[in-house]
Amino acid sequence: MGPTEIEKIESFIFHRAEVAILDQPGEDQAPFVKKTITKTGLCPDKTHLRIYFDDKYFFAVPLKADVRMSENEWSAYDHEAGLNYVIRRERGPDA
């Protein structure tokens, strides 16, 4: 994940989003939860991108992850852990 991919996730800051960390297909899956992303930043050892939901809570995505971006979704796949980090713009009531 390079600087361009990090900049793309910043378009989600201060917007309501649905976020999930998904395992391999066929495994138990965590549900999407609604959160507001407040900021991003690198972890102290600069190996992960932290995506914060407030001043204390975040999830960390490895910088080695493969990133995909569309208009309404950002995802990063961590090949080592087999996890997919997904952030979707929350849809309005008319969507």
Image (tube, helix red, strand yellow):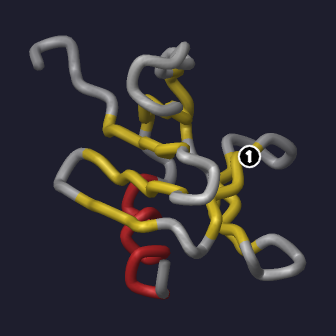
Relative to residue 62, is residue 58 depicted above or below? Answer: above
Report crowding for label 1: few under 14, some 14 to 19, many 20 or more residues within 10 A (C-alpha).
Answer: some
Q: Residue furthest bottom?
A: 3
The structure residue drawn at horizontal position 49% and vertical position 78%, both measured from the top left corner, is: 1
The structure residue drawn at horizontal position 51% and vertical position 66%, both measured from the top left corner, is: 65
34 lies left or right of 81: left
Please state the horizontal and vertical placement of residue 22, each as a whole percent of the image.
50, 32
Q: Secondary structure at mark 1?
A: strand
Please state the horizontal and vertical placement of residue 61, each as a whole percent of the image.
62, 58
Relative to residue 57, is residue 40 depicted above or below? Answer: below
Relative to residue 87, is residue 45 depicted above or below? Answer: below
61 lies left or right of 58: left
Relative to residue 50, is residue 87 depicted above or below? Answer: above
Which of the 4 image quarters holds residue 28? top right
71 lies left or right of 34: left
The structure residue drawn at horizontal position 38% and vertical position 65%, both measured from the top left corner, is: 67
Which of the 4 image quarters holds residue 89? top left
**Type of amino acid at the residue the image marks with label 1:** Phe
Which of the 4 image quarters holds residue 68? bottom left
Please state the horizontal and vertical placement of residue 35, each as a whole percent of the image.
55, 30
Total tally of numbered discs in the picture: 1
For the residue pair 27 and 31, the one nearer the viewer reads as 27
Please state the horizontal and vertical placement of residue 49, each as a whole percent of the image.
66, 67
For the C terminus, give its image quadrant.
Answer: top left
- Residue matched to label 1: 58
